[in-house]
Image (cartoon, helix red, strand yellow):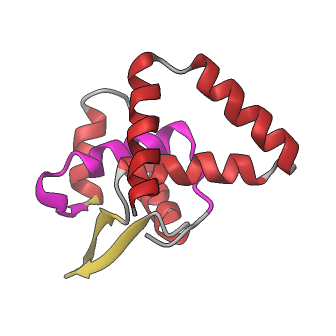
């Protein structure tokens, strides 16, 4: 996945959640995403269309023409995009502040998170 600035708002995150939940990494139309979101909140079709277009401009989703409509699919997994958000945040700090932030993150991490980090580091060491 190409690295892009992935700061996203609540509605953008909701749209991404719908796209990530699409079986087999398939794509969805604005109408399909709107129908799913409208089950949970009062939202206009045009609002969903604007958000999905914005996500395409941010290069967070692929946008393909399908007749008169577009189909959208996520460019990366939830995990990849979360990692990009973390990297983007860390990029805003100096080297010392990055180390402090990482240490604070690990100190507050659950045992499960620490285990996942150790496993990831072990894979990197073995590569």
Looking at the picture, how far across and down is residue 115, in whole percent? 40, 28
The residue positioned 22% from the left and 45% from the top of the image is 21
Q: Observer-nearest residue: 29 or 62?
A: 62
Q: In this figure, what is the number of numbered marks?
A: 0
Residue at 57%, 55% in the rendered image: 6
Q: In the rendered image, which quarter contains the C terminus?
A: bottom left
Instruction: In the rendered view, tell whether residue 16 sits above or below residue 56.
Output: above
Magenta-span inclusion, residue 10: yes
Q: Residue furthest front?
A: 126
Horizontal side of residue 81 vs 90, given as left or right? left
Query: In this picture, is 36 found above or below 60?
Result: above
Q: Is residue 23 above or below residue 5?
A: above
Residue at x-position 34% and y-position 54%: 77
Q: Nearer the viewer, residue 122 or 28?
A: 122
> Residue 81 placed where, x, y %?
47, 53
Q: Which residue lies at the image location 18% right of the left edge and 51% below the top edge? A: 22
Q: Quadrant of residue 41?
A: top left
Instruction: Give the x, y percent position of residue 3.
Output: 55, 68
Numbered range of the magenta stretch: 5-28
Taking the view exactly as shown, the residue that stands out farthest to the left is: 23
Tell me, yes or no, if residue 43 can be seen here.
Answer: no
- Residue 49 position, x and y percent, is 41, 58
Q: Quadrant of the N terminus?
A: bottom left
Residue 73: in sight, yes or no?
Answer: yes
**Would you say 20 lies left or right of 10 here?**
left
Whether 101 is among the magenta residues is no
């Amino acid at each position: 996945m190409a690295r892009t600035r992935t700061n996203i708002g609540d509605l953008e995150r909701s749209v991404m959640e719908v796209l990530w939940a699409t079986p087999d990494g398939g794509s969805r139309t604005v109408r399909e995403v709107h129908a799913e979101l409208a089950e949970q909140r009062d939202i206009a079709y045009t609002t969903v269309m604007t958000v999905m277009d914005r996500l395409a401009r941010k290069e967070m989703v692929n946008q393909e023409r399908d007749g008169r409509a577009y189909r959208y699919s996520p460019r990366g997994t939830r995990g990849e995009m979360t990692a990009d958000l973390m990297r983007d945040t860390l990029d805003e700090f100096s080297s010392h502040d990055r180390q402090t932030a990482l240490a604070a993150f690990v100190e507050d991490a659950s045992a499960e998170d620490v285990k996942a980090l150790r496993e990831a580091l072990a894979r990197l060491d073995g590569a």
